[in-house]
């Protein structure tokens, strides 16, 4: 569980509530069901126009990923590739076929299967980079759904405000209702800003960060697979892979994979 996502949401809502209370307002004063339905539900259904059903329905599962800390198993991957490199140099490339199905990472398994089949290094790189590109393309497509919703939210908020103002201007003779009607009209703008700035934009930013992290791991795997295929010394392979890690992770793994 990514506690920072929860802290961000709870903290953002608490900040809004505190600002309302300290300015003399009330929490019920910023709650309006029609405004919520028009802005939130309306902007969500607009996604049906922009995207196929699988994206409209699947966006909730993607949002769920922002509440989880992704584990790309960098330590395990580095250790596995160093071990496989040692085995390949000791017993030959074909020896890697034994136990290949036990590997958890499908991307690395694909690359090593190509190595065992005797595929040329340039061909292996091309296949793996193409697969990596397709994975990233799918990630970016989901991120674009989030960004689209982030843009639709304020737009629907403004539409709701205009609709509210039209209704208010039709009843100008009732002076006592002008203030409350204006407040309700502006409520949709508030909800639209909530959608964009508190939820969808931060969610998409976090997903972009996760995508970047995953792509670095994929690049590391490609480098490792090609080093095994080229017959590099396991120590050299380990040093190559460690360059892809951040300093903290590198220090943790370094002492284990670079043992004399």
Image (cartoon, rainbow, N blue to C red):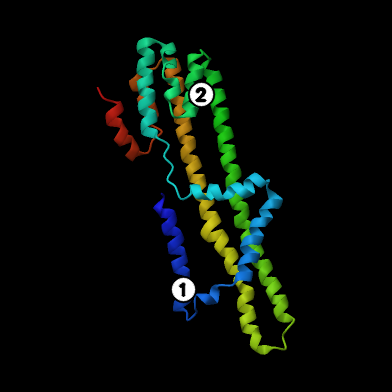
Is tag 1's residue or tag 2's residue first in the polypeptide sequence? 1
Q: Is residue 233 visible?
A: no
Q: Secondary structure at mark 1?
A: helix
Mark 2 neighbour class, 10 Å CA radius: few under 14, some 14 to 19, many 20 or more = some
Which residue is pictured at 56% across the width and 37% down the height? Answer: 136
Counting from the top left corner in percent of width and height, residue 31 is at: 55, 72
Mark 1 neighbour class, 10 Å CA radius: few under 14, some 14 to 19, many 20 or more = few
Q: CA distance from mark 1 to mark 2?
A: 54 Å
Q: Secondary structure at mark 2?
A: helix
Counting from the top left corner in percent of width and height, residue 186 is at: 62, 73
Check contact, mark 1 vs mark 2: CB within 8 A: no
Which residue is pictured at 55% across the width and 28% down the height? Answer: 129
Relative to residue 52, is residue 215 drawn left or right? left
User: Circle 2 sits on which residue?
Assistant: 110
Single out the mark in the foreground, 1 or 2.
2
Which residue in the rendered view is the most extreme toward the right?
170
User: Circle 1 sits on which residue?
Assistant: 19
């Amino acid at each position: 569980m990514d506690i920072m996502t929860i802290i961000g949401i709870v903290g953002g809502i608490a900040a809004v509530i505190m600002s309302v209370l300290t300015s003399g307002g009330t929490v019920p004063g910023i709650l309006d069901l029609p405004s919520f339905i028009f802005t939130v539900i309306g902007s969500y259904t607009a996604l049906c126009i922009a995207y196929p059903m699988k994206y409209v329905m699947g966006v909730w599962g993607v949002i769920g990923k922002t509440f989880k800390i992704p584990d790309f198993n960098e330590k395990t991957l580095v250790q596995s590739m160093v071990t496989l490199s040692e085995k390949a140099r000791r017993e030959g490339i074909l020896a890697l076929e034994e136990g290949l199905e036990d590997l958890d990472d499908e991307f690395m398994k694909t690359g090593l299967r190509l190595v065992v089949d005797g595929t040329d290094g340039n061909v292996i790189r091309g296949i793996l980079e193409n697969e990596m590109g397709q994975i990233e393309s799918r990630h970016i497509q989901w991120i674009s759904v989030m960004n689209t919703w982030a843009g639709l939210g304020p737009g629907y908020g403004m539409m709701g405000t205009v609709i509210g103002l039209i209704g208010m201007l039709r009843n100008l003779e009732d002076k006592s209702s002008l203030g409350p009607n204006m407040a309700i009209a502006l409520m949709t703008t508030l909800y639209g800003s909530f959608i964009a700035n508190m939820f969808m934009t931060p969610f998409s930013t976090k997903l972009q960060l996760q995508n970047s992290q995953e792509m670095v791991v994929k690049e590391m795997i490609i480098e490792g697979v090609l080093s095994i295929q080229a017959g590099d010394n396991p120590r050299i392979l380990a040093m190559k892979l460690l360059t892809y890690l951040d300093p903290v992770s590198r220090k943790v793994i370094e002492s284990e994979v670079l043992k004399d």
